[in-house]
């Protein structure tokens, strides 16, 4: 089931000119816009070198733009363009629709239980990579 969902998500992203990594970057930028490339790297837990290539690709495809930082001459801010904002809004809408489809008929108490269980699993998976 999860493999089918991941494949479907990848196809949907690909149709919009996005990879999973690009979509994750747009998602974080929509929540924290604007960000420096270092901040994006930190949020995504990747190296600054990876972010440079990622932002280059997003900029080339019109999802983001780079601007000078107002107070730090060494830093560059990355901002979503209208296209980037629209892509992030669509991803959020689709995520909300999927959540409603999967959990819409659950009681609030059941949703809380499911979220708590997912959080515990995510914490374990995250901790497993640190061993």
Image: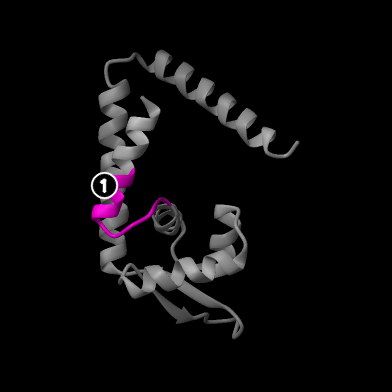
Residue at x-position 32% and y-position 15%? 106
Quadrant where the C terminus lies? top right
Q: Residue furthest bottom?
A: 73
Residue 36 spot, x, y in % from top left = 54, 70
Rendered view: 68 above or below 30: below
Q: Residues within 10 Å of mark 1 (few under 14, many from 20)?
A: few
The verdict on residue 16 being magenta is: yes
The verdict on residue 4 being magenta is: no
Tell me: 7 left or right of 25: left
Quadrant where the N terminus lies? top left
Rendered view: 37 above or below 24: below
The quadrant where residue 80 appears: bottom left
Tell me: 71 left or right of 64: right
Residue carrying label 1: 12
Residue at x-position 61% and y-position 83%? 74
Image: magenta residue range: 10-20
- Between 21 and 107, the one lying in front of the other is 21
Residue at x-position 53% and y-position 66%? 51
């Amino acid at each position: 089931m999860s493999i089918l969902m991941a494949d479907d998500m990848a196809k949907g992203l690909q149709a919009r000119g996005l990879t999973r990594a690009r979509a994750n970057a747009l998602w974080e930028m929509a929540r924290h816009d604007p960000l420096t490339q270092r901040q994006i790297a930190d949020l995504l837990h990747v190296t600054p070198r990876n972010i440079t290539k990622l932002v280059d690709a997003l900029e080339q495809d019109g999802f983001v733009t780079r601007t000078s930082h107002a107070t730090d001459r060494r830093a560059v801010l990355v901002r979503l363009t209208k296209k980037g904002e629209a892509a992030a809004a669509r991803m959020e809408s689709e995520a909300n629709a999927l959540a409603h489809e999967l959990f819409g008929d659950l009681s609030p108490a059941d949703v809380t239980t499911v979220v708590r269980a997912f959080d515990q699993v995510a914490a374990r998976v995250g901790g497993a990579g640190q061993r």
